[in-house]
Amino acid sequence: MIFLLALPKGGIAAGGLPVTFGYVMLGALAPFSVLSALRNGGPAPAAIANFLFGYVPISALAMLKLLSSGSSYGLAIYAVTLVILPALMLLIHAPVLERLSERQIGEPVKWCLRFVVFWGLLNFVLFAVSKRFIEIPYLTINPLDLGDIYSKNNRRGILMKLVSTYNNGNIYGVCMVMLLPVYWYFERSRTWLCLFVLAIILSLSRTVWAGLIVVTFGMILSGQLRISRPAVWFSLGSAMLMVVALLPLMGWTSDRVVDTNLGGRMAQWNDVVLSAFGQAEVRISEVLYAGLLQSFGIIGTLLALGALAFPVVYAMMNWQLFTPLRRAAVVGVGSYLLMAASDAAFIYPPTIAILLALCALAYRRGDRSASGNPSRHIAAPRPLGPITLAQAAARLR
Protein backbone atom coordinates (compact mmCIF):
# COMPACT_ATOMS: atom_id res chain seq x y z
CA MET A 1 0.00 0.00 0.00
CA ILE A 2 2.88 2.36 0.70
CA PHE A 3 4.15 2.15 -2.88
CA LEU A 4 0.71 2.08 -4.50
CA LEU A 5 -1.01 4.81 -2.50
CA ALA A 6 1.61 6.92 -0.70
CA LEU A 7 4.57 6.74 -3.13
CA PRO A 8 3.05 5.53 -6.41
CA LYS A 9 5.72 7.12 -8.63
CA GLY A 10 8.62 5.76 -6.61
CA GLY A 11 10.76 3.57 -8.83
CA ILE A 12 13.53 3.41 -11.38
CA ALA A 13 13.90 3.89 -15.13
CA ALA A 14 14.58 0.91 -17.37
CA GLY A 15 15.29 1.68 -21.01
CA GLY A 16 13.27 4.88 -20.91
CA LEU A 17 10.33 3.11 -19.27
CA PRO A 18 9.35 3.99 -15.68
CA VAL A 19 9.29 0.92 -13.43
CA THR A 20 7.42 1.67 -10.23
CA PHE A 21 8.17 -0.15 -6.99
CA GLY A 22 4.44 -0.65 -6.33
CA TYR A 23 3.89 -2.62 -9.52
CA VAL A 24 7.08 -4.62 -8.96
CA MET A 25 5.96 -5.51 -5.43
CA LEU A 26 2.58 -6.70 -6.68
CA GLY A 27 4.43 -9.21 -8.82
CA ALA A 28 7.04 -10.11 -6.20
CA LEU A 29 4.42 -10.81 -3.53
CA ALA A 30 2.22 -12.86 -5.87
CA PRO A 31 3.72 -16.27 -4.89
CA PHE A 32 2.88 -15.65 -1.23
CA SER A 33 -0.69 -14.69 -2.14
CA VAL A 34 -1.00 -17.84 -4.27
CA LEU A 35 0.09 -19.99 -1.32
CA SER A 36 -2.42 -18.21 0.91
CA ALA A 37 -5.18 -18.76 -1.65
CA LEU A 38 -4.34 -22.47 -1.96
CA ARG A 39 -4.53 -22.89 1.81
CA ASN A 40 -7.55 -20.74 2.54
CA GLY A 41 -9.71 -20.63 -0.57
CA GLY A 42 -9.46 -18.87 -3.90
CA PRO A 43 -10.93 -15.61 -5.17
CA ALA A 44 -14.62 -14.82 -5.12
CA PRO A 45 -16.60 -16.17 -8.09
CA ALA A 46 -17.46 -12.61 -9.13
CA ALA A 47 -13.75 -11.68 -9.32
CA ILE A 48 -13.04 -14.75 -11.45
CA ALA A 49 -15.96 -13.92 -13.75
CA ASN A 50 -14.80 -10.30 -14.07
CA PHE A 51 -11.37 -11.46 -15.20
CA LEU A 52 -12.40 -14.34 -17.48
CA PHE A 53 -15.38 -12.73 -19.18
CA GLY A 54 -14.17 -9.13 -18.99
CA TYR A 55 -10.42 -8.68 -19.14
CA VAL A 56 -9.47 -11.84 -21.06
CA PRO A 57 -11.48 -10.96 -24.22
CA ILE A 58 -10.35 -7.33 -24.46
CA SER A 59 -6.74 -8.16 -23.58
CA ALA A 60 -6.69 -10.93 -26.22
CA LEU A 61 -7.85 -8.43 -28.86
CA ALA A 62 -5.29 -5.86 -27.70
CA MET A 63 -2.40 -8.35 -27.68
CA LEU A 64 -3.26 -9.59 -31.20
CA LYS A 65 -3.21 -6.03 -32.51
CA LEU A 66 0.00 -5.09 -30.72
CA LEU A 67 1.86 -8.25 -31.71
CA SER A 68 1.01 -7.66 -35.37
CA SER A 69 1.58 -3.93 -35.70
CA GLY A 70 2.45 -2.41 -32.33
CA SER A 71 5.69 -1.33 -30.70
CA SER A 72 7.41 -3.20 -27.89
CA TYR A 73 6.76 -0.17 -25.66
CA GLY A 74 3.03 -0.29 -26.35
CA LEU A 75 2.98 -4.04 -25.89
CA ALA A 76 4.57 -3.70 -22.45
CA ILE A 77 2.19 -0.92 -21.38
CA TYR A 78 -1.02 -2.68 -22.37
CA ALA A 79 0.13 -6.11 -21.24
CA VAL A 80 0.61 -4.67 -17.76
CA THR A 81 -2.63 -2.67 -17.85
CA LEU A 82 -5.00 -5.22 -19.37
CA VAL A 83 -3.47 -8.60 -18.47
CA ILE A 84 -0.94 -8.64 -15.64
CA LEU A 85 -2.52 -6.19 -13.21
CA PRO A 86 -6.07 -7.57 -13.54
CA ALA A 87 -4.76 -11.11 -12.97
CA LEU A 88 -2.70 -10.03 -9.97
CA MET A 89 -5.38 -7.93 -8.30
CA LEU A 90 -8.53 -9.95 -9.04
CA LEU A 91 -7.24 -13.53 -8.91
CA ILE A 92 -4.10 -13.56 -6.78
CA HIS A 93 -4.17 -10.74 -4.22
CA ALA A 94 -7.94 -10.36 -3.79
CA PRO A 95 -8.26 -13.53 -1.63
CA VAL A 96 -5.81 -12.01 0.86
CA LEU A 97 -8.34 -9.22 1.54
CA GLU A 98 -10.70 -11.89 2.82
CA ARG A 99 -8.11 -12.91 5.43
CA LEU A 100 -7.86 -9.37 6.76
CA SER A 101 -10.22 -7.47 9.00
CA GLU A 102 -11.54 -4.08 7.98
CA ARG A 103 -9.24 -2.52 10.59
CA GLN A 104 -6.19 -4.23 9.07
CA ILE A 105 -7.13 -2.86 5.68
CA GLY A 106 -8.24 0.56 6.86
CA GLU A 107 -5.30 1.61 9.03
CA PRO A 108 -2.62 1.54 6.29
CA VAL A 109 -5.05 3.06 3.78
CA LYS A 110 -5.82 5.90 6.19
CA TRP A 111 -2.18 6.69 7.03
CA CYS A 112 -0.98 6.42 3.43
CA LEU A 113 -3.63 8.87 2.25
CA ARG A 114 -2.96 11.22 5.15
CA PHE A 115 0.67 11.35 4.01
CA VAL A 116 -0.40 12.00 0.42
CA VAL A 117 -2.60 14.90 1.52
CA PHE A 118 0.10 16.36 3.79
CA TRP A 119 2.79 16.12 1.10
CA GLY A 120 0.50 17.59 -1.52
CA LEU A 121 -0.60 20.57 0.57
CA LEU A 122 2.98 21.21 1.71
CA ASN A 123 4.30 21.43 -1.83
CA PHE A 124 1.28 23.36 -3.11
CA VAL A 125 1.86 26.10 -0.54
CA LEU A 126 5.63 25.95 -1.01
CA PHE A 127 5.30 26.51 -4.75
CA ALA A 128 2.77 29.32 -4.31
CA VAL A 129 5.21 31.11 -1.99
CA SER A 130 8.63 30.31 -3.47
CA LYS A 131 7.97 28.70 -6.90
CA ARG A 132 9.84 25.64 -5.65
CA PHE A 133 8.74 22.24 -4.41
CA ILE A 134 10.38 19.16 -2.93
CA GLU A 135 11.37 16.18 -5.09
CA ILE A 136 12.93 12.99 -3.74
CA PRO A 137 14.19 10.87 -6.65
CA TYR A 138 13.20 7.18 -6.60
CA LEU A 139 10.59 7.83 -3.89
CA THR A 140 8.28 10.77 -4.57
CA ILE A 141 9.30 11.01 -8.22
CA ASN A 142 10.61 8.74 -10.94
CA PRO A 143 14.08 9.75 -12.15
CA LEU A 144 12.68 10.18 -15.68
CA ASP A 145 10.48 13.06 -14.44
CA LEU A 146 13.04 14.82 -12.26
CA GLY A 147 12.75 18.58 -12.81
CA ASP A 148 9.90 18.26 -15.33
CA ILE A 149 6.80 18.11 -13.12
CA TYR A 150 5.83 21.76 -13.49
CA SER A 151 5.94 21.57 -17.30
CA LYS A 152 3.75 18.44 -17.50
CA ASN A 153 0.41 20.22 -17.82
CA ASN A 154 0.49 21.22 -14.16
CA ARG A 155 0.50 24.98 -14.69
CA ARG A 156 -2.51 27.02 -13.62
CA GLY A 157 -1.80 30.74 -13.75
CA ILE A 158 0.47 31.64 -10.84
CA LEU A 159 -0.30 28.31 -9.21
CA MET A 160 0.73 24.74 -9.82
CA LYS A 161 -1.79 21.93 -9.55
CA LEU A 162 -1.59 19.96 -6.35
CA VAL A 163 0.18 16.80 -7.52
CA SER A 164 1.49 15.35 -4.24
CA THR A 165 3.47 12.16 -4.97
CA TYR A 166 1.40 11.44 -8.10
CA ASN A 167 3.31 14.08 -10.13
CA ASN A 168 0.25 15.17 -12.12
CA GLY A 169 -2.83 17.00 -10.92
CA ASN A 170 -5.25 15.01 -13.05
CA ILE A 171 -3.82 11.62 -12.06
CA TYR A 172 -3.80 12.65 -8.41
CA GLY A 173 -7.32 14.03 -8.51
CA VAL A 174 -8.83 11.09 -10.39
CA CYS A 175 -7.27 8.59 -7.97
CA MET A 176 -8.33 10.55 -4.88
CA VAL A 177 -11.92 10.90 -6.11
CA MET A 178 -11.99 7.12 -6.62
CA LEU A 179 -10.67 6.56 -3.12
CA LEU A 180 -12.82 9.19 -1.38
CA PRO A 181 -15.72 6.88 -0.41
CA VAL A 182 -13.36 4.25 1.04
CA TYR A 183 -11.26 6.87 2.83
CA TRP A 184 -14.45 8.45 4.18
CA TYR A 185 -15.46 5.04 5.51
CA PHE A 186 -12.19 4.53 7.41
CA GLU A 187 -11.29 8.07 8.48
CA ARG A 188 -12.74 9.35 11.75
CA SER A 189 -11.01 12.74 11.85
CA ARG A 190 -13.12 15.54 10.41
CA THR A 191 -10.00 17.64 10.04
CA TRP A 192 -8.33 15.07 7.78
CA LEU A 193 -11.54 14.59 5.81
CA CYS A 194 -11.73 18.34 5.15
CA LEU A 195 -8.06 18.44 4.17
CA PHE A 196 -8.57 15.46 1.86
CA VAL A 197 -11.41 17.21 0.00
CA LEU A 198 -9.45 20.48 -0.05
CA ALA A 199 -6.50 18.69 -1.65
CA ILE A 200 -8.81 17.28 -4.35
CA ILE A 201 -10.10 20.78 -5.13
CA LEU A 202 -6.54 22.10 -5.32
CA SER A 203 -5.75 19.61 -8.08
CA LEU A 204 -7.24 22.46 -10.18
CA SER A 205 -8.72 20.01 -12.70
CA ARG A 206 -12.20 20.48 -14.14
CA THR A 207 -12.52 16.73 -14.63
CA VAL A 208 -11.68 16.16 -10.97
CA TRP A 209 -14.09 18.85 -9.82
CA ALA A 210 -16.85 17.19 -11.84
CA GLY A 211 -15.80 13.84 -10.40
CA LEU A 212 -16.02 15.26 -6.88
CA ILE A 213 -19.62 16.27 -7.55
CA VAL A 214 -20.40 12.84 -9.01
CA VAL A 215 -18.84 10.91 -6.12
CA THR A 216 -20.68 13.12 -3.61
CA PHE A 217 -24.02 12.24 -5.17
CA GLY A 218 -22.97 8.60 -5.30
CA MET A 219 -22.18 8.65 -1.59
CA ILE A 220 -25.55 10.26 -0.89
CA LEU A 221 -27.41 7.65 -2.96
CA SER A 222 -25.53 4.81 -1.26
CA GLY A 223 -26.42 6.17 2.18
CA GLN A 224 -22.85 7.07 3.12
CA LEU A 225 -23.71 10.79 3.26
CA ARG A 226 -26.97 12.15 4.64
CA ILE A 227 -28.20 15.31 2.97
CA SER A 228 -30.28 16.10 6.04
CA ARG A 229 -27.10 16.93 7.95
CA PRO A 230 -26.19 20.66 7.86
CA ALA A 231 -22.48 19.77 7.72
CA VAL A 232 -22.97 18.27 4.24
CA TRP A 233 -24.49 21.46 2.84
CA PHE A 234 -21.90 23.60 4.59
CA SER A 235 -19.12 21.50 3.05
CA LEU A 236 -20.63 21.70 -0.45
CA GLY A 237 -21.01 25.46 -0.16
CA SER A 238 -17.45 25.87 1.10
CA ALA A 239 -16.11 23.80 -1.79
CA MET A 240 -17.94 25.96 -4.33
CA LEU A 241 -16.64 29.16 -2.73
CA MET A 242 -13.13 27.72 -2.78
CA VAL A 243 -13.37 27.09 -6.53
CA VAL A 244 -14.63 30.64 -7.13
CA ALA A 245 -11.75 32.06 -5.07
CA LEU A 246 -9.18 30.05 -7.02
CA LEU A 247 -10.33 31.17 -10.48
CA PRO A 248 -8.50 34.56 -10.55
CA LEU A 249 -5.27 32.92 -9.35
CA MET A 250 -5.57 30.41 -12.19
CA GLY A 251 -6.12 33.16 -14.74
CA TRP A 252 -9.62 31.86 -15.49
CA THR A 253 -12.99 33.50 -15.75
CA SER A 254 -16.17 31.75 -14.66
CA ASP A 255 -17.01 30.71 -18.24
CA ARG A 256 -13.92 28.48 -18.34
CA VAL A 257 -15.09 26.27 -15.49
CA VAL A 258 -17.38 24.38 -17.88
CA ASP A 259 -15.40 23.71 -21.05
CA THR A 260 -17.33 21.96 -23.82
CA ASN A 261 -14.02 21.36 -25.57
CA LEU A 262 -12.79 19.32 -22.57
CA GLY A 263 -9.57 21.31 -22.44
CA GLY A 264 -8.75 20.40 -26.05
CA ARG A 265 -9.57 16.72 -25.55
CA MET A 266 -12.79 16.87 -27.59
CA ALA A 267 -10.55 16.40 -30.65
CA GLN A 268 -10.08 12.80 -29.53
CA TRP A 269 -13.82 12.26 -29.96
CA ASN A 270 -13.84 14.07 -33.30
CA ASP A 271 -11.03 11.87 -34.63
CA VAL A 272 -12.84 8.61 -33.89
CA VAL A 273 -13.53 6.48 -36.97
CA LEU A 274 -16.15 3.88 -36.11
CA SER A 275 -15.51 0.30 -37.15
CA ALA A 276 -16.08 -3.20 -35.84
CA PHE A 277 -12.60 -3.82 -34.40
CA GLY A 278 -10.91 -0.42 -34.60
CA GLN A 279 -7.82 0.90 -36.31
CA ALA A 280 -4.44 -0.81 -36.54
CA GLU A 281 -2.87 1.41 -33.87
CA VAL A 282 -3.70 0.80 -30.21
CA ARG A 283 -3.63 4.08 -28.36
CA ILE A 284 -5.69 5.10 -25.35
CA SER A 285 -5.16 8.76 -24.48
CA GLU A 286 -6.89 10.88 -21.88
CA VAL A 287 -10.47 10.23 -23.07
CA LEU A 288 -10.85 6.53 -22.34
CA TYR A 289 -13.95 5.76 -24.40
CA ALA A 290 -12.74 7.63 -27.47
CA GLY A 291 -9.46 5.71 -27.26
CA LEU A 292 -11.29 2.40 -26.93
CA LEU A 293 -13.50 3.13 -29.94
CA GLN A 294 -10.55 4.20 -32.06
CA SER A 295 -8.31 1.31 -31.00
CA PHE A 296 -10.76 -1.59 -30.65
CA GLY A 297 -13.89 -0.50 -32.48
CA ILE A 298 -17.47 -1.01 -31.37
CA ILE A 299 -17.08 -4.69 -30.51
CA GLY A 300 -13.83 -4.14 -28.62
CA THR A 301 -15.30 -1.21 -26.71
CA LEU A 302 -18.24 -3.34 -25.59
CA LEU A 303 -15.77 -5.98 -24.39
CA ALA A 304 -13.81 -3.33 -22.47
CA LEU A 305 -16.96 -1.91 -20.92
CA GLY A 306 -17.87 -5.42 -19.84
CA ALA A 307 -14.61 -5.60 -17.93
CA LEU A 308 -14.70 -2.11 -16.42
CA ALA A 309 -18.40 -1.92 -15.54
CA PHE A 310 -18.69 -5.51 -14.28
CA PRO A 311 -18.34 -4.61 -10.56
CA VAL A 312 -20.97 -1.87 -10.81
CA VAL A 313 -23.49 -4.16 -12.54
CA TYR A 314 -22.74 -6.96 -10.10
CA ALA A 315 -23.23 -4.61 -7.14
CA MET A 316 -26.55 -3.33 -8.46
CA MET A 317 -27.79 -6.92 -8.73
CA ASN A 318 -26.68 -7.75 -5.16
CA TRP A 319 -26.86 -4.36 -3.41
CA GLN A 320 -28.72 -5.57 -0.32
CA LEU A 321 -25.97 -8.12 0.40
CA PHE A 322 -23.17 -5.56 0.16
CA THR A 323 -21.53 -4.25 3.32
CA PRO A 324 -20.93 -0.47 3.68
CA LEU A 325 -17.25 -0.92 2.74
CA ARG A 326 -18.11 -2.83 -0.43
CA ARG A 327 -20.68 -0.18 -1.35
CA ALA A 328 -18.09 2.56 -0.85
CA ALA A 329 -15.70 0.72 -3.19
CA VAL A 330 -18.39 0.43 -5.88
CA VAL A 331 -19.19 4.16 -5.66
CA GLY A 332 -15.48 4.84 -6.24
CA VAL A 333 -15.41 2.57 -9.31
CA GLY A 334 -18.56 4.17 -10.74
CA SER A 335 -17.15 7.67 -10.22
CA TYR A 336 -14.01 6.74 -12.15
CA LEU A 337 -16.02 5.35 -15.07
CA LEU A 338 -17.82 8.70 -15.38
CA MET A 339 -14.62 10.76 -15.10
CA ALA A 340 -13.05 8.53 -17.77
CA ALA A 341 -15.26 10.22 -20.38
CA SER A 342 -13.09 13.32 -19.92
CA ASP A 343 -9.71 12.27 -18.49
CA ALA A 344 -9.12 8.68 -17.41
CA ALA A 345 -5.32 8.62 -16.82
CA PHE A 346 -5.86 4.96 -17.71
CA ILE A 347 -2.35 3.77 -18.53
CA TYR A 348 -0.51 5.90 -15.98
CA PRO A 349 0.48 4.34 -12.63
CA PRO A 350 -1.21 3.86 -10.25
CA THR A 351 -4.67 4.52 -11.74
CA ILE A 352 -5.61 1.06 -12.98
CA ALA A 353 -4.06 -0.60 -9.91
CA ILE A 354 -6.23 1.51 -7.59
CA LEU A 355 -9.31 0.85 -9.73
CA LEU A 356 -8.67 -2.91 -9.56
CA ALA A 357 -8.03 -2.73 -5.81
CA LEU A 358 -11.47 -1.13 -5.39
CA CYS A 359 -12.95 -3.91 -7.53
CA ALA A 360 -11.27 -6.47 -5.25
CA LEU A 361 -12.81 -4.73 -2.24
CA ALA A 362 -16.21 -4.79 -3.94
CA TYR A 363 -15.93 -8.56 -4.41
CA ARG A 364 -14.65 -9.12 -0.87
CA ARG A 365 -16.93 -11.57 0.88
CA GLY A 366 -15.64 -10.57 4.32
CA ASP A 367 -12.66 -11.28 6.54
CA ARG A 368 -12.23 -14.93 7.48
CA SER A 369 -11.03 -16.43 10.74
CA ALA A 370 -7.99 -18.68 11.04
CA SER A 371 -10.24 -21.69 10.52
CA GLY A 372 -11.39 -20.28 7.21
CA ASN A 373 -14.93 -19.55 8.38
CA PRO A 374 -16.49 -16.26 7.33
CA SER A 375 -16.74 -13.60 9.99
CA ARG A 376 -19.92 -11.87 10.90
CA HIS A 377 -19.26 -9.26 8.18
CA ILE A 378 -20.30 -11.75 5.50
CA ALA A 379 -23.94 -11.61 4.59
CA ALA A 380 -25.70 -14.82 5.52
CA PRO A 381 -27.46 -16.70 2.71
CA ARG A 382 -31.16 -16.17 2.47
CA PRO A 383 -33.09 -18.99 4.15
CA LEU A 384 -35.19 -21.27 1.98
CA GLY A 385 -37.86 -21.75 4.65
CA PRO A 386 -38.86 -20.60 8.14
CA ILE A 387 -36.08 -19.60 10.52
CA THR A 388 -35.74 -20.04 14.24
CA LEU A 389 -35.68 -17.24 16.80
CA ALA A 390 -31.95 -17.87 17.32
CA GLN A 391 -31.32 -17.51 13.58
CA ALA A 392 -33.35 -14.29 13.50
CA ALA A 393 -31.38 -12.87 16.44
CA ALA A 394 -28.12 -13.77 14.70
CA ARG A 395 -29.21 -11.93 11.57
CA LEU A 396 -30.13 -8.84 13.57
CA ARG A 397 -26.65 -8.78 15.09
Image (cartoon, helix red, strand yellow):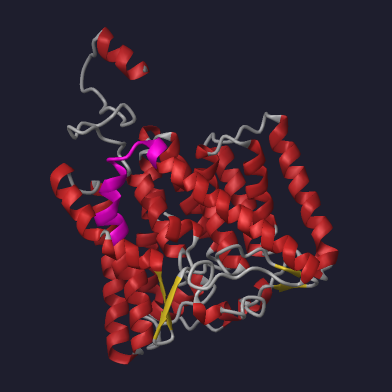
Horizontal side, residue 209 vs residue 180: left or right: right
Q: Residue furthest left?
A: 39
| Magenta highlight on residue 244 | no
Q: What is the quadrant of residue 316 in the picture?
A: top left
Asked whether residue 91 is drawn in magenta, I would say yes
- Residue 266 horizontal/vertical position (percent): 62, 76
Q: Quadrant of residue 205?
A: bottom right
Could you say where residue 48 lies in the image, as x and y percent from the top left?
24, 54
Of the pair 106 and 137, the residue shown nearer to us: 137
The N terminus is located in which quarter?
Answer: bottom left
In this picture, is 377 found above or below 98? above
Residue at 32%, 85% in the rendered image:
66
- Image quarter of the C terminus: top left
The image quarter containing residue 370 is top left
Image coordinates of residue 33 in percent, x first then y, are 23, 53
Position above or below: 348 against 307: below
Q: Judge by depth and name the residue closer to the eye, 305 or 10.
A: 10
Q: Is residue 381 above or below residue 137?
A: above
In this orientation, does residue 209 appear? no
Percent x, y of residue 174: 56, 60
- Residue at figure coordinates x 66%, y 63% from the top left: 162
Dominant secondary structure (helix, strand or loop) of the stretch shown in magenta: helix
The residue located at (45%, 46%) in the rendering is 108
In the image, is 372 to the left or to the right of 89?
A: left
Kindly give the residue lying farthest to the top in the view shown.
389
Q: Is residue 85 visible?
A: yes
- Tell me the magenta residue range: 87-104
Q: In the displayed structure, would residue 394 be above or below residue 179? A: above
Please give the name of the residue rendered at 24% of the width and 56% of the height, measured from the top-left corner: 92
- Residue 281 in the figure: left or right of residue 226: left
